Image (cartoon, helix red, strand yellow):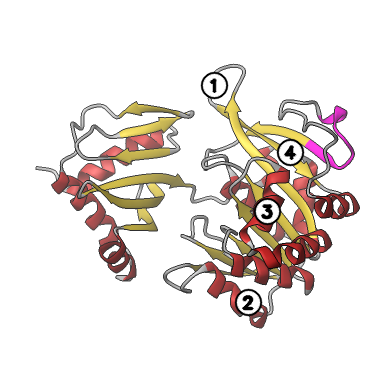
Amino acid sequence: MDSPAEILEVLLRQAVERGASDVHLKVPSEPLMRVHGVLERIPGLGRLTPVQAEGHLASMLAGLPHSARQFEFESRGEVDFTAALPGVGRFRVNAYRQRGSVTLILRPVPFAVPRLDDLGLPAEVGALAGAPHGLVLVGGPAGSGVTTTIAALIDRMNDGPPRSVITIEDPIEVLHADRTCAINQREVGLDTASVADGLGRVLRHDPDVVMVGSLDDPRAIDVALDAAADGVLVIAAVSTADPSEAIERLVAAAASPRRRAVRTALASCVRAVVCQRLVAREDGAGRRAEARVVTGEEQIRRLVLAGGVPYAAEPPPFEADAGSTPDAMAVGSATATSR
């Protein structure tokens, strides 16, 4: 009988060959994979048993060079980590218990760092890699390519002037090798206790650029704003598909007495807001990314203080032609991996 590791390899190999963005393993159901945004069954593997699910998780955790993630799962009932399957690929894994059984969601992560030119995003996005300081927000719903866009930005920096780059991620997905830049990647739960703790002393690490995998904690927001004000370029992911909402969520995360101060700080340091999503291609061959990019520091500063982002009455749809949008906004689309 095949071992859990062997069964998992067969399953994930099928998913990678089909270009799946996610794999779902749930007791007592057949494995599912999401292809071009649609869930479909993986044939020939039958229904997942509790013993198989436990075995799949154990085989992946056993491949990690530490036991911290195992302890986290045992104590909290859920865990995020990244695992590599030789000859198949790397995967971001989310494991949690439901009704006493293990459920796993696995998302393929490319070995090769994506290139901005291949994503076909608006030129304004690529220009942000050279920004000297300030706060850049990159938003979108889950699976919209935010991780890919940020990784591509870091990769472009890595071909430019030498800079010190610190990333704080949960977990680390895309691995960056030093070229012109010194890139230190810190993983929450392994290298630092939380995003806020990782940011707490980040200015002592002599960074030129700080990347935050998720900016939603009030303490982390305060430190990120301080770093941006101190001359560091801070690139942060936010879970929203609307530029105005990206700003308002950061403000709303602060305690009531702090919200005016946070809004003022945002007005002084926000350099750009990028929001993207994946939509079906017109030819039916998968999905493509569409992005709205809000730039123009004066427009952002004025409208952040007023409680909005530079749109007139209604924001134009993602499908609008770039030539018909305001000067402060660019719209672009491209084929992209769903991550």
Say which residue appears at 59% left-offset and 66% top-offset. 167
What residue occupies the far front of the structure in this picture? Answer: 257
Residue beneath label 4, please? 292
Q: Which stretch appears magenta?
A: 322-330
Q: What's the distance in space between the residues labelled 4 and 2, CA to CA? A: 30 Å
Residue beneath label 2, please? 202
Q: What's the distance in space between the residues labelled 1 and 3, CA to CA? A: 26 Å
Q: Earlier in the sequence, mark 3 or mark 4?
A: 3
Q: Earlier in the sequence, mark 1 or mark 3?
A: 3
Q: Is residue 161 left or right of residue 173?
A: right
Type of amino acid under label 4? Arg
Residue beneath label 3, please? 153
Res 121 → quadrant: top right
Type of amino acid under label 3? Leu
Q: Earlier in the sequence, mark 4 or mark 2?
A: 2
Q: Secondary structure at mark 3?
A: helix
Circle nearer the viewer, 1 or 2: 2
Crowd band around label 1 with a 10 angstrom C-alpha radius: few (<14), some (14–19), many (20+): few
Circle nearer the viewer, 3 or 4: 4
Q: Mark 2 and mark 1 in contact (Cβ < 8 Å)? A: no
Q: Position of residue 70 (x, y in %)?
A: 28, 65
The label shown at residue 285 is 1
